[in-house]
Structures are given as C-alpha cells and as structure tokens.
Amino acid sequence: MTELTYPYALPPLPYAYDALEPYIDAETMHYHHDKHFQTYVNNLNAALKPYPYLQTKTLAQLLRSPQALPRAAATAILHNGGGAYNHNLFFNGLAPASAEKHAPAGRLEQQINRDFKSFDNFKTAFNAQAGAVFGSGWTALAQNLRGTLQIVSFPNQDTLITKGLRVLLLVDVWEHAYYLKYKNARADYLTAIWNVLKLSEDCAH
Ligand code: MN
C-alpha cells in the first residue's frame, strides 16, 4: 500500500488469522489487523480529505517529506500514515511457521554473519533492544546506505523512511501486539515471533 494513493484501503492479511498460532493468536490478529491497522487507515483518509493536492501522493511520498505537509494536518498524517506504513510492513513480514524459511539464507545470512557474527548473536541483540523499548514502539533490522545492517528501535508510529534506512525486518512492540496472549511478558512474545518472522532472502520489503 505504500505506493498507493488516497483513498487508502486496508490490505487484507496475506494468510489466515489463525495461521500464526500458537505464536500469535487469532484474537490478537483480528484486533491488531481489523481494528488497530484499520483505524490508522481510516484516520489517514480523514486527515487527507481536505487536501486534494496531497491525495495524489503515495503514502511513501507523504512520509518522506514531512516539511511539505500543511501544519494543521501534519501530525495526523504522520501519526496515521506512519501507523499504516509500519503495520503494512509488519503483517507482510510474517508468515506461518510451516510456510516460509525462518532462518536467514543467501545474502541475508552472509550479511547477518558479517555484521553480527552469527544469527544467534543477532537474535539475542535484537530481542535485547526490542525488550528495552520504553513505551510504544518498534524494533527493526535495517540496512543503511552503505549496506551495513543495524538494529534500530523507534517510538510510536515514527518510520525509518526519512533516515536513509531500508527496513528488512520489523517487530511491533506496542502492547496491543502481544498483550492478549502474553500479558506483560514481552520477552516471551519476542522469543515466539522468530517462528513466524519471514527471514528468506527476499524478506526485504
Ligand atoms: Mn501494532
């Protein structure tokens, strides 16, 4: 949806709601996709409604140039556009445990070994960072302009689109992503999610 324009529609989940069980439960997926993601999409459309000249821009273009947004609507567009953008990446970055590789291969495996020594080291570092996010936010594996991989956390519905970083993996650490099943145990959610995170060579979105 990031290359689409207004009015935005909620992208359907690319798998069944219960397809990520037992790691992510169907009830969480319904609330997360149908309520939270849908609300960001609805609010983004509402924020853009008075601005025909913004309606021809793609979501990526809107987020890439925040200074070009009208002052009265910038916060609403960035919060809700960021929410739509991040959730689109997040849901597309997951796959049923049986359907995809969930260990890195090919170039991604080489890069992870180069920049983190091993996949296990990388996972440990990633979960430590994601576990340390204070409040609501996200943790990503991202690639900078020189090709180096780095683990980056960011708050709320910010994005990495203006930071020169390409997201390869994205994990939602807002409480709504895990609270129904894991309650306060974010670490258990972070351990489980590696079973359903897409890590094939083309995981780059
Ligand atoms: Mn979320």
Image: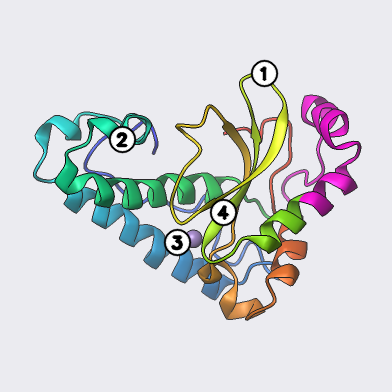
Q: Quadrant of residue 17?
A: bottom right
The residue closer to the viewer here, 151 or 34, is: 151
What secondary structure is found at the residue carrying circle 1?
loop
What's the residue type where badge 4 is placed? Trp
- Disc 2 marks which residue? 66
- Disc 1 marks which residue? 146
Q: Residue 105, relative to residue 169: is it above or below?
A: above
Mark 2 or mark 4, earlier in chain: 2
The span picked out in magenta is 98-125
Q: Is residue 67 visible?
A: yes
Q: Label 2 to label 4, Cα distance in Å?
A: 20 Å
What's the residue type where badge 1 is placed? Arg
Q: Residues within 10 Å of mark 3 (few under 14, many from 20)?
A: many
Q: Residue 28, relative to residue 191: is it above or below?
A: below
Mark 2 or mark 1, earlier in chain: 2
Q: Residues within 10 Å of mark 1 (few under 14, many from 20)?
A: few
Q: Label 4 to label 3, Cα distance in Å?
A: 16 Å
Q: Residues within 10 Å of mark 4 (few under 14, many from 20)?
A: many
What secondary structure is found at the residue carrying circle 4?
strand
The residue closer to the viewer here, 191 or 136, is: 136
Q: Label 4 to label 1, Cα distance in Å?
A: 23 Å
